[in-house]
Image (spheres, grey):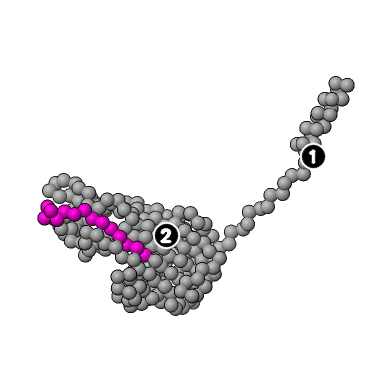
Amino acid sequence: MKSIKILSIVALVSFVFYGCPSETVDPPAPTTYYDYLPLADLNNWYYNNTIESNGPISPDILEIDGTVSSNNNTYHHFVANNDATGIYTLYMGNLDVRKDNHNYRANGTFTINLGTEAIDIPINDEVMLTEGASVGDVLSTISGTQNQTMNDIPLTIYYNLKVEVVAVDASKTIDGTTYNNTITTKTTLNMKIDATISGFTVNAMAQQDVVILNDTYADQKGMMLSEAKVEYHLEDFSAYGIDLGTPQDYLENSRQVIVNYTLN
């Protein structure tokens, strides 16, 4: 009788572990890749620009005018019109871009002007955009330190430039036009500045986000909408007779939207 009970238990265990039908697990959906930034000679994009404090300003033109070689890689060279004012077109006009599998990699500089002084952040084959990316993906992070003089005052500039994906949409409507398969990246420039005054190091600008740039790209079209915020707050040294030569507080919101493009 005892052996019958044991055999019954064994049979039950066998049924639980081997006799139950296994759950069907669906394979992950394949990644779909979109061509967010068509790269070909003479491709060009026309943008209308708006600056919050001024309203509409002259349009910008961004164009690929050929290729250049660097470190055994071939890049497409972007140029902007000489009087460009949009943050995106100014940024892209300082870049060369190549396609590396599904990554768009950039060489050049990210430039921000503090007063009359330009701060150039080097970009060395960094990922600026990725096909098949997901929301939350960090595409690249660049950190570094620069020494610079502004109004005869030595500065040490600490920076972090990060590009991340903040939206992926099946469709997005921009100023009445709907675009399919879009991606929006957020580029954030975070900075801190120390100044050397009379042999002492003092904080001239607390760590803060100075530039936030949200760019929306559409499949087989390029960048359709760019919204930028430039803001910084400097310490007030006027009581000590010290002037860095740039406004103490600055805030500007601007927008660029596509009006026409030519792709080859």
Q: Count the marks: how many?
A: 2
* Residue 243 can be seen, yes or no: yes
Residue 239 within the magenta-colored segment of the rendering: yes
> Which residue corresponds to the image point at 24% horizontal and 60% vertical from the top-left?
249
**Left or right: where does residue 68 sit relative to residue 217?**
left
Mark carried by residue 186: 2
Q: Disc 2 marks which amino acid? A: Lys
Q: Quadrant of residue 230?
A: bottom left
Q: Disc 1 marks which amino acid? A: Gly
> Which residue corresponds to the image point at 69% horizontal and 49% vertical from the top-left?
25
Q: Nearer the viewer, residue 232 or 101?
A: 232
Mark carried by residue 262: none
Residue lying at the far top of the rendered structure: 2
Q: Give SS at disc 1.
A: helix
**Left or right: where does residue 181 sit relative to residue 41?**
right
Q: Which residues are magenta?
A: 228-242
Residue density around tag 1, few if under 14, some if 14–19, many if 20 or more, within 10 Å: few
The correct choice, above or below, for 65 with respect to 186 in the image is below
Task: Point out the image quarter for the N terminus.
Answer: top right
Q: Position of residue 119 (x, y in %)?
A: 27, 60
The correct choice, above or below, for 155 with respect to 55 in the image is above
Q: Position of residue 15 (x, y in %)?
A: 80, 36
**Left or right: where does residue 26 sit relative to residue 210?**
right
Q: Give SS at disc 2.
A: strand
* Residue 34 can be seen, yes or no: no
Pointer 1: what residue? 19
**Which is nearer the N-term, disc 1 or disc 2?**
1
Q: Quadrant of residue 117?
A: bottom left
Q: Position of residue 157 (x, y in %)?
A: 26, 53
